[in-house]
Image (cartoon, grey):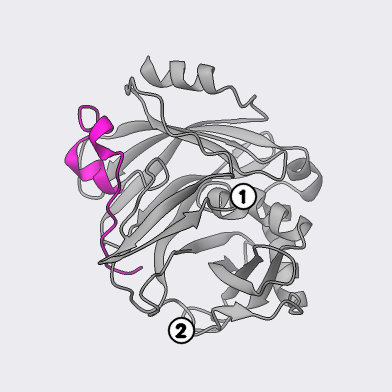
Amino acid sequence: MNSKKVVTTHFKQYACILLGALYFVLPRVNAQPTIPQSKPSMTPASPVLPPTATSDPLAIQALHKVIEASGGMKVWRDIHSAKIRLAITPMGAAQAHEFLMLDDWSSDSTRYRRGAIGMTKAPKDHNGQTTFIASSGEQQRAVPEYDQARVLAGSLPAAAAEIILRKPSYIAVQASGAKCTSDNLCIDIYRQAAPKLPFVREEEWIISQSSGLPTVIDLLLPNLSGGRPVVEEFQFDQMFSQNGLQIPSRIIMRHPSGATHVRTVVSFQPNVEFDKAAFDKELSQ
């Protein structure tokens, strides 16, 4: 949604596999993004809310509808992990590159693994306990690994919504803005990193009033400059049905740099064991 530059540190290990255009495609494989100059966010909402803040009933209802439209609460509560194989194509390019994602949200720790098919070096291990270094000009800061809902929102929004509703560390608030019309409901997701700390706005959802499904989710990146939020946008262009689940099948992702690519889901496997060795072996084949 904004034009900014994201630079990462692990690109070199993929250079022999991915084209230069895919430099902007793998944000969560990499560990040290440079945060670009900020641009306006979707809404003028407050970046923080007090520890006593609570969710809006309408926003909670909207998240419930997302889950129901995606297969139902019971089904999504029984899913605790997933492996997704993607074909990633930079906008305007002809050649796609395959990418593998493994997520496990069965515990309180965020666990995920990402990698490009064909890579031989093991990808970074994301276990919810580590940090990465965010940089903006001369400024640098260690930033905690992203939380479960944020990691899942760009690929499995129903799973992210279930986590947001289940955990008291999240609240959902109805938002306003030019894109929030009678056809679309906008909500902001805030997260409390620890008890007694304020809630910090991290996600912006646009949800179709007719289908109940999200059409766009913006994820706010760490902002060291103190200006307006820096976001990466996920537009859910198509959905597919698998065993009663509605899963995004075509996702248009826009980086803060302005680079855009299309993610097409090749396969989706729920409740897959978080086996790092098996995952890395599949990447190398």
Q: Residue at x 31, y 39 (%)?
A: 10
Q: Main secondary structure of the magenta part?
A: loop
What element does badge 2 sit on?
loop
Is there any visible trace of residue 117 in the rendered image? yes
Is there any visible trace of residue 188 in the rendered image? no
What element does badge 1 sit on?
helix
The quadrant holding residue 89 is top left
Task: Check residue 178 in the rendering and tell me which mark sits there, or answer none.
Answer: 2
Specify the amino acid type for callout 2: Ala
Q: Residues within 10 Å of mark 2 (few under 14, many from 20)?
A: few
Q: Position of residue 97 (x, y in %)?
A: 30, 32
Q: Nearer the viewer, residue 207 or 190?
A: 190
Is 90 positioned to the left or the right of 1 in the image?
Answer: left
Q: Position of residue 209 (x, y in %)?
A: 62, 70
Q: Position of residue 174 (x, y in %)?
A: 64, 78
Look at the picture and state if 275 lies above or below 236. above
